Image: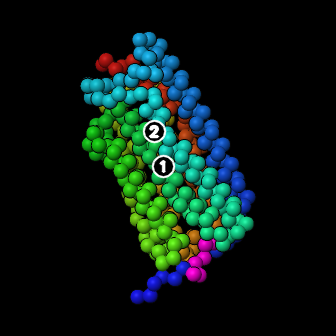
């Protein structure tokens, strides 16, 4: 069997639009900075509220405990929740760098380095968004004592989704890197396809879990009627974001199934309409959702019920 020849491999079937690339670069940078400020401000505000409820707690040293299922199960610290957002911020930065690379490609569409950078970063960034969604959702359920609403064992619920996300990330990252390598184009495309399938399957399960939580929270949370709807906006943020990422992943899966000379990959409009726009909307959804209700407010509210 003849070895795959990449000597005539076409990087782009069009000249990348520089204006669009610059626009999304700026948009991702601005949304990242805004959300970073929102997380910082919300965490600081929640820390003050928690201290006022129990003055002897120094939240810079002592963990905040929340009971789940009648027993102290996890120590939820403000800092640990903040760390859950790190993958999201990295993903946003990857998106920005990816579109910077596309802007560079607009001047030289035969340059291999910016092509590889934009291919890999734009492929894997959504997996980092997903990591934050999975981890914060798991903490939301623990805070509200709703771990019984996990589709899998409450002990391994978050790990289950994050493990699938890591697998998806690795498959897409390795596949994206191989696609422009001599003789490895098809192997790279197959790995990316497998990674997207994994991502879609796990997101499907996760969306079902979010809906199950939305329906069952009133029966599972012992203090449901004593707290505000902050939890609702957190879950709604994740649900909307999950659907956006799911749509994006399905379109990209079709793109790789069609092959390198397929209709989708040959027309730049698809990368913006079904990748850039959905991912930017995820970032915007996080910003708007944080204003309406965030995980730190939920934690501050639930703190008063940790002895129930």
Q: Residue furthest top?
A: 55
Q: Nearer the viewer, residue 305 or 8?
A: 8
Q: Position of residue 190 (x, y in %)?
A: 43, 70
Which region of the structure is painted magenta?
Answer: 7-12
N-term mark: 1 or 2:
2
- Is 47 placed above or below 158 here? above
* Residue found 58% across the figure and 36% down from its top: 36
Left or right of 268 in this view: 305: left
Residue 128's label in the rendered image is: 1
Identified at 62% across, 63% down, the residue is 114
Q: Secondary structure at mark 2?
A: loop
In the drawing, does residue 45 fall left or right of residue 72? right
> What residue did someone put label 2 on?
84
Query: Does residue 225 show up?
Result: no
- For residue 56, what is the image quadrant? top left
Which percent across, then down, holds residue 26? 68, 48
Q: Nearer the viewer, residue 225 or 241?
A: 241
Which image quarter holds the C terminus? Answer: top left
Q: Between 90 and 39, which is closer to the camera in this rendering?
A: 90
> Is residue 257 left or right of 277 when viewed as pictured?
left
């Amino acid at each position: 069997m003849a070895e795959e020849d990449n000597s005539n491999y076409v990087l782009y079937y069009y000249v990348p639009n520089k204006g669009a690339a610059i626009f999304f670069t700026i948009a991702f940078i601005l949304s990242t900075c805004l959300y970073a400020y929102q997380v910082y401000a919300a965490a600081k505000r929640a820390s003050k509220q928690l201290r006022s409820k129990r003055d002897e707690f120094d939240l810079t040293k002592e963990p905040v405990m929340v009971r789940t299922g009648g027993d102290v199960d996890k120590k939820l610290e403000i800092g640990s929740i903040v760390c859950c957002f790190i993958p999201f911020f990295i993903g946003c930065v990857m998106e920005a760098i990816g579109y910077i690379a596309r802007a560079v490609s607009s001047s030289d569409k035969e340059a291999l380095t910016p092509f590889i950078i934009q291919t890999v970063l734009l492929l894997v960034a959504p997996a980092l968004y997903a990591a934050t969604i999975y981890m914060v959702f798991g903490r939301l359920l623990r805070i509200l004592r709703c771990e019984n609403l996990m589709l899998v064992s409450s002990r391994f619920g978050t790990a289950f989704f994050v493990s699938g996300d890591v697998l998806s990330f690795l498959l897409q990252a390795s596949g994206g890197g191989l696609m422009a390598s001599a003789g490895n184009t098809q192997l790279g495309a197959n790995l990316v396809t497998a990674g997207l399938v994994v991502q879609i399957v796990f997101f499907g399960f996760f969306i079902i879990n979010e809906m199950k939580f939305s329906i069952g929270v009133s029966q599972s949370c012992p203090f449901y009627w004593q707290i505000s709807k902050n939890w609702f906006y957190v879950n709604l943020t994740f649900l909307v974001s999950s659907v956006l990422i799911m749509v994006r992943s399905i379109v990209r899966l079709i793109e790789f199934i069609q092959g390198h000379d397929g209709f989708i990959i040959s027309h730049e409009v698809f990368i913006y309409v079904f990748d850039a726009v959905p991912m930017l909307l995820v970032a915007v959804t996080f910003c708007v959702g944080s204003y309406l209700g965030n995980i730190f407010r939920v934690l501050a509210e639930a703190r008063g019920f940790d002895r129930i």
